[in-house]
Amino acid sequence: MGSLTQVTGLLNLAINDFPRDNAQLNIEAGVTANIGAGGVLRDPGDRTAIYGSGANGTPFSLTETLGVGIGYSIGRNVVGLEPYVQHESFSTVATQGSTGSFLSGAWVLGVKLDLIRFNTPGDRSP
C-alpha cells in the first residue's frame, strides 16, 4: 500500500495507587483508521490475487485495540505489563478471506512489557 495515512483515537483511564500504593491500573482502548492514499502497490514477484473494493481504489481498514495493564513504580523506575487484544476490521483489500465486515480481519493477542526510567534535571546532559 502506498502513502499509508493513519488517524488514531485513544482513550486511557489510569487509576493511581490501585490495587496498592505505587501501582497504577491502566485501561486503554483505541481505534485507528488505515488509509492507503497511494493505492495498492503490488509486489512484482508475487502473483497472489488481491481483491476487494480497495484493490483498484483507496485501501481502508480500522484497527481496534483494547488493553488492561498494571505498572509499579520503584523510585524513578516503572515496570509495567499490559495484555491486549487487537483486531483489524472493515478492510477493503484482502489476499484471502472476506472483506468489508467487522469479522473479516485478523485478531492478535499480545503482551506489552514496559521498562521506564524518569529523568530528573540532574540526569540530563548540558
Image (cartoon, rainbow, N blue to C red):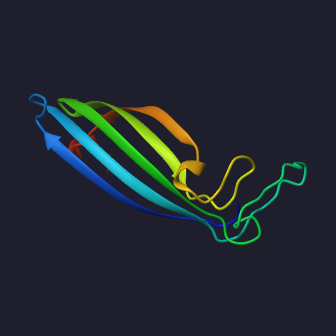
Looking at the image, residue 106 lies above or below residue 38: above
Q: Position of residue 9 (x, y in %)?
A: 38, 61
Q: Nearer the viewer, residue 121 or 99?
A: 99
Q: Position of residue 82 (x, y in %)?
A: 35, 34
Name which quarter of the figure residue 25 lies in: top left
Q: Nearer the viewer, residue 126 or 103?
A: 103
Residue at image point 65% right, 62% down: 92
Q: How many marks?
A: 0
Residue 68 falls left or right of residue 52:
left
Name which quarter of the figure residue 15 lies in: top left
Residue at image point 75% right, 50% down: 95
Task: Identify the image quadrant of the N terminus.
Answer: bottom right
Residue 115 falls left or right of residue 49:
left
Looking at the image, residue 57 lies above or below residue 123: below
Residue 41 falls left or right of residue 102:
right
Q: Position of residue 84 (x, y in %)?
A: 40, 37
Residue 24 falls left or right of residue 50:
left
Residue at image point 13% right, 29% down: 19
Q: Position of residue 98 (x, y in %)?
A: 67, 52
Looking at the image, residue 89 lies above or below residue 124: below
